[in-house]
Image (spheres, coloured by chain):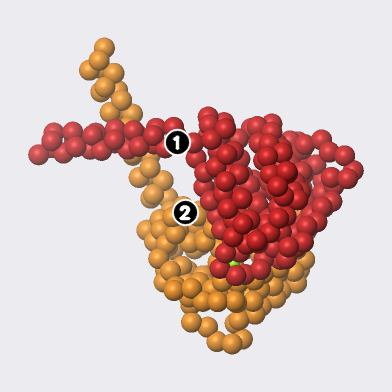
Chain colours: A red, B orange
């Protein structure tokens, strides 16, 4: 999961056109606006499908931490595919976004922009040092797999060194 | 290089505070605004240092192509470190951003937001299907290096298969 968190004077959107993967929404969801909010642009990635619970709980912890630092109780969850080149399935992404909304809602005023729609948006970023942060969240198991691959490469290179020396 | 291109009703920024890698700027550069512009958020990456000329010319081609598609002659170049987790050196990034500005300036009204400053910004994204695009640009040579690494891994795995079968 990729997160881009922006402490915003305001964030507002309106849907313009559905895409083939658009979430079905009713009229009230077609526009949204929050003032003095933490806007969280989110890309749910394919690797998140291998460790959903962990990724969701770490995202919640990160969002709560930053919301506390910038002292806001308003959160806009905004799907943003452009933060990753390896996205999850659309249905998985929608379900994760809804889960984040559900978990955060008891403690914050949460809005969620709809998934899979072309949207116009306006945002004002405050510009103080904590007003823009990005986070990459990956399931631990995957990190282990990556480390194993690196070991294979380094063993292979060692073997090659031995063979040519 | 990572690019995020947004067709904008307006984009405006003002510097708030310098960081340790801040570009030296004079007063006139501390605020900027363009209307009806293509905003290009840019992260210059470490791998770009291995193929600067190629990356710059492909970025210019992409920016010109999108500016043509959305029919604007105004371009805001906006450094955006949050688009990558593997950034180039600050001095390389500044020099690339200045080169993009120089190459595009004869044909477009170009503004460039300063590098290494905390900035407040306001943007309005139009929301039509071409109004948000992202691009990853990597030197060709690097792609070859990656392919070679994959071959090493697959040869190593084949060797392991043989050893255990
Ligand atoms: Mg900024």
Q: Residue A97 falls in which quadrant of the image?
A: top right
The mark found on residue B85 in the picture is 2
**Residue visible at 85% across and 47% down?**
A30
Q: Secondary structure at mark 2?
A: loop
Residue extending furthest toward the front: A107
Q: Residue A144 falls in which quadrant of the image?
A: top left
Asked if residue A102 shows in the view, the reply is yes
Q: Nearer the viewer, residue A153 or B107?
A: A153
Q: Is residue A165 above or below residue B79?
A: above
Q: Could you tell me which quadrant the N terminus of chain A lies in?
A: top right
Q: Nearer the viewer, residue B82 or A28?
A: A28
Q: Is residue B28 above or below residue B95?
A: below
Circle 1 residues within 10 Å: few <14, some 14–19, many ≥20: few
Asked if residue A16 shows in the view, the reply is no
Q: Position of residue A31 (x, y in %)?
A: 84, 51
Using the image, name the chain to which the residue with label 2 belongs: B
């Amino acid at each position: 999961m990729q997160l881009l968190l922006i402490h915003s004077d305001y964030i507002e959107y309106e849907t313009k056109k559905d895409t083939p993967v658009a979430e079905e929404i009713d009229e009230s969801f077609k526009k949204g606006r929050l003032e003095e909010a933490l806007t969280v642009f989110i890309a749910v990635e394919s690797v998140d499908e291998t460790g959903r619970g962990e990724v969701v709980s770490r995202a919640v912890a990160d969002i709560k931490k930053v919301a506390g630092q910038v002292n806001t109780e308003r959160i806009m969850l905004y799907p943003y595919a452009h933060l990753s080149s390896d996205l999850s399935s659309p249905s998985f992404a929608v379900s994760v976004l809804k889960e984040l909304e559900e978990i955060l809602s008891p403690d914050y005023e949460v809005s969620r922009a709809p998934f899979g729609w072309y949207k116009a948006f306006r945002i004002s970023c405050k510009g103080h040092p904590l007003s823009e942060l990005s986070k990459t969240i990956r399931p631990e198991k995957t990190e282990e797999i990556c480390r194993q691959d690196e070991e294979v490469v380094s063993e292979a290179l060692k073997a090659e060194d031995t063979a040519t020396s």
